[in-house]
Image: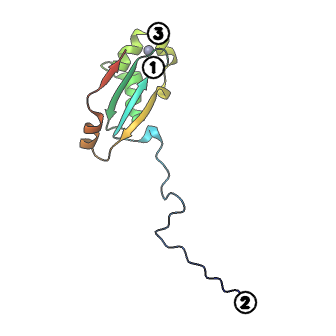
Amino acid sequence: MIMNYKFKPLTYNVCLFSVKDPIPCDLRARVVYKFSCAGCTASYVGETVLHLATHVNEHLVSDRASHIYKHLERNETCLRICSKKCFQVLDSAATELALKIKGGPKHVCY
Ligand SMILES: [Zn+2]
């Protein structure tokens, strides 16, 4: 008995795996992010066109005008335990205009 198997070849539009590796969160740009303080209930939602890692470093180290910087400067316990792990990406956008629309007004909660 002869079995006649027909295999259908895979076509190029079949996606077996992702073509691109996902971009790590801290290297993503044009994102809406949330800071949740590890030491208290303070939180902050903002957006940036920079890589998130660059902007997080500004908040934690160098931007004295930043709400997060000011919060950590005033609260020694929060300063000691907060790190880049307190930031999470909420959303991202393809253009700066789309980012402004998604980000909306900044929110600070203390
Ligand atoms: Zn805090």
Residue that carries the numbered disc 3 in the rendered image: 76
State how far apart marks 1 and 3 are (Cα): 12 Å
Q: Tell me which amino acid carries mark 3.
A: Glu
Q: Tell me which amino acid carries mark 1.
A: Cys
| Residue under the point 48% across and 20% down | 82
Determine whether 32 is above or below 106 in the image: below
Q: Which quadrant contains ligand 1? A: top left
Residue 52: % across, % down: 40, 35
The residue nearer to you, when weighing 51 against 5, is 5
State how far apart marks 2 and 1 are (Cα): 70 Å
| Residue under the point 37% across and 31% down | 55
Residue that carries the numbered disc 1 in the rendered image: 37
For discs 1 and 3, the disc positioned in front in the rendered view: 1
Residue 60: % across, % down: 41, 22
Mark 1 beta carbon near ligand 1 (under 8 Å)? yes
Residue that carries the numbered disc 2 in the rendered image: 2
Residue 87: % across, % down: 44, 29
For discs 3 and 2, the disc positioned in front in the rendered view: 2
